[in-house]
Structures are given as C-alpha cells and as structure tokens.
Image: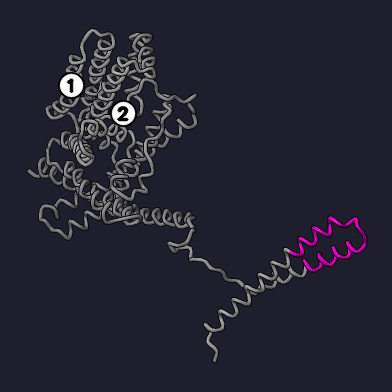
Amino acid sequence: MIDKEDFGPITRSRRRATITSAKSETVKLRNGAIAAASDLKSGPKARESLTKNLQLNEDSKQKCDRYDKISCHRLQESMLSSASSFKNYRGILNWCVVMLVLSNARLFLENILRNGILVDPIQVVSLFLKDPYSWPAACLVIVSNIFILVALYTERKLAMGSISEKVGLLIYIFNLTIILCFPMVVVLKLPSITPVGGAYALGVYTILFLKLYSYKDVNRWCRERTQAKARSLSRSLSSVSNTMTSDDMRIYIYYFVFAPTLCYELNFPRSESIRMGFLLRRLFEMTYFISNVLSIVFQWMVPIIRSSMKPLQEMDYSRMTERLLRLAVPNHLIWLIFFYWFFHSSMNFVAELLRFGDREFYRDWWNSETITYFWQNWNIPVHKWCLRHFYKPLLRRGAGKLLSQSAVFFASAFFHEYLVSVPLRMFRLWAFMGMMAQLPLAWFVARFLRGNYGNAAVWLSLIIGQPIAVLMYVHDYYVTHCYD
C-alpha cells in the first residue's frame, strides 16, 4: 500500500506547478492582449492574434476556477488559538453580559422571596441624618469656605509682596493642617454625625486639602519663574496678579474648588458651550445608579453581613470563607457602579456644567496587567496630583524610585484609613494595611505574572480584597457598638 505521507508531497508539488503555470500563462496572455490591442490598427492579423489571446485567457481562468473548486484548504489557525489574529469577540462579550444578567436576576428573585423587600426610604435618610432638623455634616462642609478664603488672602499678600515666602509657607502649613484635623475632631466629638455623613464631610475636606496644596505649589512655582525672568510664564503671572481684581481672583479659586480636578493651573482648558442633552443624560445616570447602589446595600449586602457575625465570632473558617465569597459579588458590583457613577457620570456632569475641558478622569484600568498600572489609571485626578506634587518632588530631592513609590502608597494608605476609621470612630488599620499590602502584591504580579494572568490577578485582588476589609470593619463595628 502507498503511504499518504509519500503521496502528499507529490500531489502538492503538482498543484504548485499547475498554479504557477496557470499564473504565468495568464500574465503572458495579458501582456499579449495589451500588445495586440496596441497594434489593432496594423491589420487583420493583429485582430486574429488578439482573439486567440483572449480565448487563451478565458481557458486559463477556467483552469484556475476548476482548481479552486478542487482545493478548499489553506494554512490557518483556529480562531480561539493564541496564534490567530482574530480579535472580534463581541458575541462572547454579549453572551457574558446575558449570563451575568440572568444569574443576578435569579439571585435577586431568590433574595426577594427569602427576605422580602428590605429597602426602606427612612433607613436611607437615617444613613445621613440622625435628626431631620439637624444637619451637622452639611454645616461642617459650609465651614470649609473659611480655609479657602485664608488661602486666597495669603496668595494675594504673597503676590503683592506684603509678606515673605517663609511667612506665607507657615500660614499654608497651619491652614492645611487645620483642614485635616478640624473635621476629624468634630466627627469624633459630635455624636449627631452619622458614619456616612462623617465620611462625606471628611471626603470634602480631603479633596479641599489636595486642591489647596496644589494651589500653593503652582503659585509658588510661578513666582519663582517670574523672578527668574521666564518669558513663558511671566506674562501669565502678571496677567493674573496685576490685571485680576480681588473679586476675579475669588471667583477663579472657587471655580478651581468646584472643578473636577485636583491640580491647579492659571488657565484651564474650557469647552465651547454646555450640551444640555449630555448634561441631562449624566444627571439621569447619577440618579439611577445611586439608587441601584442603595438597593444592593440594603437588599443584598446587609443580610449577608448580618449572617456573617456568628461565624466571625466563632472563628468558623469554612463558613467565614463562604460568607466572604457571597459578599464578594455584591461588593464588587457596588464598586463598579460607584466607579461609573463618580468618575464618569458625576465628574462629567460637573465638567459640562463648568465647561471644564479636560475630561480624562480614568483610563483603561480594566486591562491592567500589573497592580501598578491599575493604580496609575483608575483615578487620573489623584494620579496626576501624586505625580506632580509628591512623586516628582521626591525624585528631584534625591529620593529613589522605590522609596518615592512607597511614600506615595503610604500617603494613600493614610487617607484611606482617615476616611474609614474616623467616621466609624474606631481605629483598626485594616484599610491602611490593605493599601500597604499592594506593594508586595505589585512586585509579585510584575515579577511572576504576565498578560492575562496578571490581569486576572488584578481582578482577583479587587473582587476578594475589598470584602475582606469590609467584613473586618463591620465585625469590629458590630462588636464595639452593638455586642456589648
């Protein structure tokens, strides 16, 4: 018997010869047809030659068509293979969305049948207010105007030369320190402030701290460049300090305070007009998604957290793991919804209202293959502030990259703990340790994981890491305030 492997090369060589000869004949015939067409006026022989060439051309095309009918294979990879260049997975993405909707619909229906409707508007209001006639968190936010005016007054005196740079620096240090300490003392000492209201007020003061720090740095840089006769910024500084009145300066700093950025500039990019359709869509998204977050919290997360207290007290690790995995899904959904609500809907709403032109509030953090890439791209305003006012100044003063990165993570860990422990009125350092744990995790992922494995590690840290901290804080809060 003849082996197929011995017969295969001969057949392929014959096929190649047939194709080559057909192609060469086609080229020759085409060239002959062109030449005959050019000599068409020379006589009847040229016309006969043209007719023969066209006939041969048709015969060669028929040979190629017959070969195409016989051969139906070519060298190619499967679509799902990594060596394939196929990248259109839209259908699979739609399938994942459909499966996600169906699975969550089942969980939602099961939750309704088991627990009933747990969302209560009165409980939602009680998250922010203990007494409907007392609004301490809102009053605390209003008081923050004092610190804005102090920074504005200090900058005006520095621009006019009424006070020295050292005196101005001391005023700024005192003002920024009070911005962090004053709301913390009020929240800790005033029992009428709820944890949610306290977190909101502290968040406003934290944002104000970062904005006024940038305000201080940029104006100091401009004064230094003016003194050094820098042409590029001397005109900008003179126009701001000399031509702007006190009312204009007050309006401009309040524009910066409300603008969706943490980095101050003398001239922000502005859009041409306000798009009302865009504005209304963002407003609808803000209303819709915040209601979704509250529904998931009361209907889904609260029952899981309540059922987790007993396993935590008994240190039943198997049931604790099961509760952790159950909590991971709604917690992660809330995180994703909050990201879209805050960084896309809310910040675009404010930017459109103020005609703020720079709308890069996030990048493609969902494609992160390293922990470092995630933290650099999921919160662009904070990343720009850290890079501009913290990381690069440390490098210019001689600090190494590793030390500077560690310092940035340390500052971020401090503010995470500040925004969680103070409103809850207990200090457990779970948020601080969670942020500092990102350093060895970032090294491990960058060193040992690549591509899709690194991206999976980033998603796993987001899905599992946050519920652990949530359970720790809820357990400690329950033990501290309810168990005794």
Q: Mark 1 points at which residue?
A: 173
Q: In the rendered structure, does residue 347 fall within the stretch colored magenta? A: no
Total labels drawn: 2
Above or below, comparing residue 204 to residue 20 in the picture: above
What is the magenta range?
A: 28-57
Please indicate whether residue 180 sits to the left or right of residue 109 in the image: left
Please indicate whether residue 221 sits to the left or right of residue 320 in the image: right
First along the sequence among labels 2 and 1: 1
Above or below, comparing residue 104 to residue 200 in the picture: below
Q: Quadrant of residue 482?
A: top left
Q: Name the residue under label 2.
A: 262
Q: How crowded is mark 1: few (under 14 residues within 10 Å), some or many (20 or more)?
A: few
Please indicate whether residue 3 sits to the left or right of residue 388 in the image: right
Colouring mode (rainbow / by chain / secondary structure / one colour): one colour
Please tell me which residue is depicted at 33% across the width and 9% down the height of the picture: 246
Residue 214 placement (x, y as % from top left): 28, 25
Please tell me which residue is depicted at 22% across the width and 58% down the height of the picture: 322
Location of the C terminus (image quadrant): top left
Above or below, comparing residue 208 to residue 84 in the picture: above
Which SS class for mark 1? Answer: helix
Residue type (three-letter) at the residue carrying disc 1: Ile
Q: In the rendered structure, does residue 31 fall within the stretch colored magenta? A: yes
Q: Nearer the viewer, residue 110 or 152?
A: 152
Q: Secondary structure of the magenta portion, mostly?
A: helix
